[in-house]
Amino acid sequence: MPGALDGQVAVVTGASRGIGRACAVALAREGANVVVNYNSNEDAAKATQKAVEALGVKAIVVKADVGKADEAKSLIEAAEKAFGKVDILVNNAGINKDKTIQRMSADDWDAVVQTDLSSIFYTTSAVVGGMRERNYGRIVNMSSIIGQMGNIGQANYAAAKAGMIAFTKSAARELARFNITVNAVCPGFVETDMVAALSDDIKKTLIGNIPLGRFGTAEEVADTVLFLCKPSGAWYTGAQMSLNGGQYM
């Protein structure tokens, strides 16, 4: 059966594991060819590539630190060289360096803002030219519940993720006339390596604050990204999709 995204090309940043990998696989399942971006873990990125190719589509792996403007541009250029176009951009790459404001260094601040926020400007500015020419594009930015409500010890992360939401709203208004939608997905606490590393006591406390009583899954987040990229999500732009089990409304 043909997929809803047959023939389309998706770039997923930070796709070597977790939510990024789940997004790559979900898009591939609907027929999209995928550019798997990673920064440090090549083996994990190749594992994502294999999972994508197993679904009968094409995939390439591209190493790039999207927090650097030249590397983000090179990523998009590599995608266009390999596949001729980019229809979908999922800005998922992100890091955290959690410390209280008093203990946070300028380097801690800059690293998170560059990787989590500046990167989406770099990749988006590189991809929109081709999208405008084809009068079509889907851009999804992976924000966070922390960008909506803030959190102790995460001022840098919260500021970057909130900035992603503001960027999404502005880009959505600017690009709508070219049939390019731009949306933000704001997951709560999801079963990823980051959450798995927490102590059982912290996990218990976090779950206690989630009305649905559990963490989300990477696949649930990926399903929302997929919805925004399919024809069924075509009238969504500038939206914040909050997936948090009722923790923040």
Image (cartoon, helix red, strand yellow):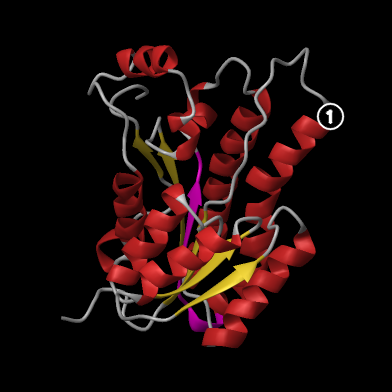
Q: Residue furthest left?
A: 1
Q: Position of residue 175 (x, y in %)?
A: 54, 63
Residue under the point 45% across and 30% down: 195
Residue extending farthest to the front is 43
Residue underneath mark 1: 106
Residue 60 placed where, x, y %? 52, 76
Within 10 Å of disc 1 (Cα), the crowding (few <14, some 14-19, many 20+) is few
Image coordinates for residue 47, horizontal then vertical, percent: 45, 64
Q: Amino acid at mark 1?
A: Ala
Question: The residue tagged with tag 1: helix, strand or loop?
Answer: helix
In screen coordinates, is 8 left or right of 162?
Answer: left
First to last magenta residue range: 133-143
Decide if residue 2 is in sight here: yes
In which image quadrant can residue 61 be found?
bottom right
Nearest the viewer among 194 and 12 is: 194
Does the magenta run of residues contain 141? yes
Please determine whether, in this image, residue 176 is positioned above or below residue 209: below
The percent position of residue 238, horizontal first and vertical second, equals 45, 49
Q: Residue at x 55, y 55 (%)?
A: 14
Figure label count = 1
The residue nearer to you, when weighing 33 against 87, is 33
**On screen, 192 above or below 17?**
above
Q: Is residue 21 left or right of residue 151?
A: left
